[in-house]
Image (cartoon, rainbow, N blue to C red):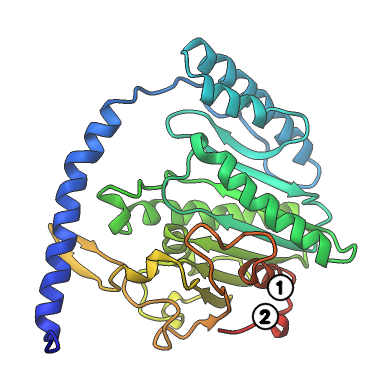
Amino acid sequence: MGQVPPTHLRRRVLRALLAALLTAAVVAPLAGAARPGIPAPPPAALPALSPSTLHSVYAANRANARAAARMAATHSAPHRSATDRALAAPSRHLLAFDGRGAGQVTEVLGDLVQARHIAVLVPGSDTSLDTYARFHRTAASLYADLTHRAAGTPVAVVAWLGYETPATVGTTVTTTTRADEAAPRLRAFVRHLRAAAPAASHVSLLCHSYGSVVCGRAAPGLAADDLALIGSPGTGADSAAALHTRARVWAARGSEDWIAHVPHVRAALLGTTVGFGTDPVSAAFGARVFDAAGADHSGYFTPGSASLANLARITLDEPSEVTRA
């Protein structure tokens, strides 16, 4: 079979993206209409984040989660109520909680006040309060690996669900719209996080899937030391240099990750920009590409995996120990 000319290939890609957008435009509203909103109180009023206010912040958010659990139970939403109730447990450390709509929560694993190395996890599509347990397991897996490696050095992992993630099947997942909304929140959060942590703490952002688009849009002015893009469809930037960040930029994709088949294009379509541009693991992008072995799209934090080991090394500021692809 002859090689398809680049112009024909581009037309095929754009047609495929257009078809996906039109399908999502029909499917997404129907899916949303079938699911009524679950009531919850507005977020708690919180003091400015600092070492002295941290426990007050945790307590206020737990109380808010308890109230949300009661409201969800009254609304006959047992799954949401159980999630809220679990987050209200005394052992949970919530920097933020909002039980309204799809929900948002930011949780700390470890002692933030003492932590010398902090990882902030930024999730991708289909992450909400209703799927938060899965995201928490990801954070817990990294925290367990870090504490094993750190030899007594205080570490913390922050699960940041601080934005409304797009659905995997939907119009927003192919554009930077949600990422553009989330980016200033992420920048502000990292700035506030540093106010509560030791001054010399090393902060790494580990950004998965659509979360890497969020990190890419937030990168200019982001107070991070390392930025790791995993299972990324692209960042909206043509290169690591175009992210305009002082952080070291890393990227990885496992050999079993379906995201490899997403076209790395960016084009104007129906009044918006569709696609995220250059592949972050390509030589053209210029990131430090590390080994993720056979990870699939959900497998980057699997205990014992090459990808988890390398993410821990990045978090612990051990760049020479990171195994390269």
In the image, residue 157 sits, relative to residue 276, either above or below, namely: above
Label 1 belongs to which residue? 313
Can I make out residue 118 in this image?
A: yes
The residue located at (15%, 67%) in the rendering is 14
Q: Nearer the viewer, residue 278 or 11?
A: 11
Q: Residues within 10 Å of mark 2 (few under 14, many from 20)?
A: many
Question: Callout 2, which amino acid?
Answer: Val
Q: Residues within 10 Å of mark 1 (few under 14, many from 20)?
A: many
In the image, residue 68 sits, relative to residue 133, either above or below, namely: above
For mark 1, give the secondary structure: helix
For mark 2, give the secondary structure: loop
Quarter of the image where one finds residue 258:
bottom left
User: Distance between the Cα atoms at labels 2 and 1?
Assistant: 6 Å
Label 2 belongs to which residue? 322
The residue located at (47%, 55%) in the rendering is 184
Where residue 26 sits: x, y (%)? 17, 40
Where residue 140 sits: x, y (%)? 69, 50
Can I make out residue 41 in this image?
A: no
